[in-house]
Image (cartoon, grey):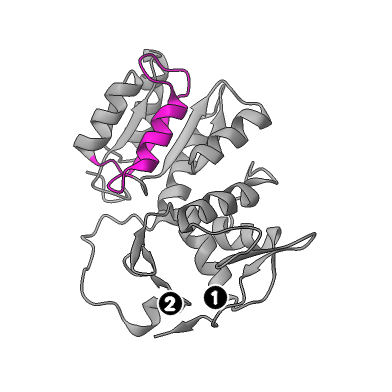
Amino acid sequence: MDPRAPSTRPILVVDDDAKIVRLVRTYLERDGFTVVTAADGRSALQAIEREAPALVVLDLMLPELDGRAVIRAVRREDASASIPILVLSARGSTIERIAGLEDGADDYLPKPFSPSELVVRIKAILRRAGTNPAPVDRAAPSAADTLRYGDLRIDRGRHEVTAAGRPVALTAVEFRLLTALLEADGRVLSRDQLLDAVYGDDQADVLDRTIDVHVRRLRDKLGDSPVRPTYVATVRGVGYRAAPVRGARSE
């Protein structure tokens, strides 16, 4: 494995077009990634369970089981819920892209696409997810790594969240979004500020409504209500803030 590769776990490429699979594989392996492939939705789910990939590149129009169904199935299972998914699809309309994000995709690149841009996006997603080739240190987290807000506990080092003691499986984007809101300790953050916190410099082609989509998914996972919020409150016309419970603090 090339030492530049961000993970010893493979990238799973799912597409029924063999030419696209070969193209994506070539560019990823050139950058030091290990690649495994699947040609239909059911095989994709089997590969995810078997390989525990670092990231999935997923077409939507697949035989056996379509891509959106694959995303929903992955997000339902605790073991796979946090695996990043980049959709690579000819369905490139804004409506389709928002639907993919709402299902749980981390990013969406329409076809036709630039293979070089695909690799850049994959690296950005893995960077946000904190994927690292070194073994994960499971030692006890330091005080600064743990954040509490009401009955929420966020372990930054282990990328773990519990709500009232219940584990909550979040994607890397959802984890960064929640952490940014809680660290703001009640201050309102605009959508632009949240985009900066979540994506940093990797905001190319990010839809304006992306933050709203991720907030909806975050609320669903936390069992939060937009009407009577416990964790994330909407400030209309401005952005979002942590709901007024106890202030966030490091343990």
Residue 147 is labelled as 2
Q: Position of residue 109 (x, y in %)?
A: 55, 32
Q: Is residue 176 left or right of residue 9?
A: right
- Looking at the figure, which quarter contains the N terminus? top left
Total labels drawn = 2
Rounded to the nearest angstrom, the CA distance separating label 1 from label 2 is 8 Å
Return the residue nearer the eye: 1 or 63: 63
Could you tell me which residue is drawn at 50 percent across and 61 percent down? Answer: 176
Q: Residue furthest right?
A: 237
- Asked if residue 138 lies in the magenta stretch, the reply is no
Could you tell me which residue is drawn at 29 percent across and 30 percent down? Answer: 45
Range shown magenta:
52-80
Q: Position of residue 8 (x, y in %)?
A: 23, 47
Q: Position of residue 29 (x, y in %)?
A: 31, 34
Residue with the mark numbered 1? 183
Discs 1, 2 touching: Cβ within 8 Å: yes
What amino acid does circle 1 point to?
Answer: Glu
Chain-order first, disc 1 or disc 2 = 2
Crowding around mark 2 (Cα neighbors within 10 Å: few <14, some 14 to 19, many 20+) is some
- Residue 202 visible in the picture: no
